[in-house]
Amino acid sequence: MDAGSTLTNERTRGAATDTDSFTSSSPRPKLAFVYNPRSFGAMALADAANGLCDLVWVVDTSHPEVESMTRLLRRFGPCVDVAGLSIDEAASKIAEHAPQGILSLADDSLLWTAEVAIRLGLTFLSPATAARLTDKHVQRQALREGGLSVPRSWLVRHGEEETAWSTIASEASFPAVLKPRLGAGSRDTIPITTPDELRALGALPRSFDDHPRDFVLEEFIPDATYPAGGEGFAGYVSVESFVSDGHVTHLAINGRMPPAPPFRETGFFIPSALDNEQERAVLEVASRALTAMGVVVGCLHTEIKLTPTGPIVIEVNGRIGGGVPQLLASANGVRMLSLAMRLALGEEVVCDEMPPCNRLAYLFYVQAPEELRTITAVEGLNELQKVAGVDEIILNRGPGQNVDWREGNLGYVFSVAGTVADHVELRHVYGLVASLVRISGD
């Protein structure tokens, strides 16, 4: 299915046009894109913008990963370097290119982009909403105030641990999860099973990048005693959504494979294996969560756990989930990166219902064993490539490279993507990944 047959854009209410509303007869609008190398790749972004808008890359070359990418980025549009600039100075420099929209798809730049957008008079998340979507402590408060069921949580500030541990240990119930206040991808996320484990930590663990920061301790959301997400699947899902002019539309429910210890993602698939009643309950909770966040425009990725008492929000992310554009394009034809750009450019996008899926699309992230620190061999990938339903295998960490569970989802060894007919075939392919490939190391 072509996304244009499902998602209609409106330049004004009631005036529907084709998906490619910007034609060569008039200059394409400019979109200031705040680039982050840990988000989506330059080629994928350039493809999403093709025929829709001209990209103006906003880069901070004080980060080595960004600086090394600027040569490639300039092939697809000018670069505006904001390294060392204040928000006002950065906004003035971006304004020289007269963009009609601004967009960020990375957690750690949402708030900065929101502040710049206000100064430029462009459509984006408000600073208050961006804070709710990136600060786990603030988000929990907003969800609670919005009437949603959330686990109890405590903020632990760097340097104040000695006082905090004693109070929390006496108030909290365990098991619990200690996670960075600001962060994504399960980096530095630690299970805490007893109060003694909490006290034994002493100082807060430094980040994977060796920076001190605040953490949030949350009571662990209990698992269902039955396979709530489907036989062989994890008991949580994510909802992929967008908001246009305050109207929430859900594009898909994304199923999950069981995580690797402690909380590392191992795979996603669209559509999920939920039944109709579960779907309705999950979508209702996702809608309420986005309302609680105060989202008026943008693309969202909401993680929801399936518990015996009903769906509970794990986290709301103010950007597209990793791997989701690839899954949606394969499953139902929606081009989500292009959709995010259209929303940022001020288009009103209408979708009457969740698009049907023609195929089941999956993306597996294969993680190293928790104790491994260096990869010595990854064997069996050639055999796996021959399996029906396997379209692409990408090696992320090869022999001689380091791995660390603290790096979270991004530290996976290799990924496997493809499409299958149904969830039975999905389980079969997932089993073959485990049986055919062997990861060894020290």
Image (tube, helix red, strand yellow):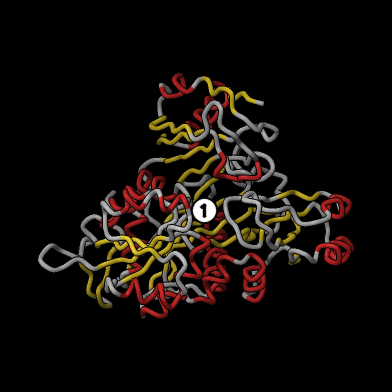
Q: Quadrant of the C terminus?
A: top right
* Placement of 394 over or under 27, stated as above or below: above
Residue at horizontal 63%, vertical 25%?
441
Q: Is residue 15 visible?
A: yes
Residue drawn 73% across and 60% down? 218
List x then y, in percent, for residue 51: 21, 57
Asked whether 276 or 240 is in front, the reply is 240
Q: Is residue 152 visible?
A: no
Q: Secondary structure at mark 1?
A: helix
Q: Identify the image quadrant of residue 29.
A: bottom left
Classed neighbour count for the residue bearing mark 1: other residues with Cα under 10 Å, few (<14), some (14–19), many (≥20): few
Describe residue 19's horizontal placement relative to residue 377 as left or right. left
Going by the numbered disc 1, the residue's amino acid type is: Asn
Q: Position of residue 66 (x, y in %)?
A: 43, 53
Q: Please report the residue visible at 44 percent of the width from the left and 50 percent of the height from the top.
A: 324
Residue 352 rendering spot, x and y as whole percentages: 36, 64
Left or right of 2? Residue 252 is right
> As displayed, is residue 141 above or below residue 208?
below
Would you name the residue on which mark 1 appears? 276
Residue in the foreground of this view, choosing between 157 and 291? 157
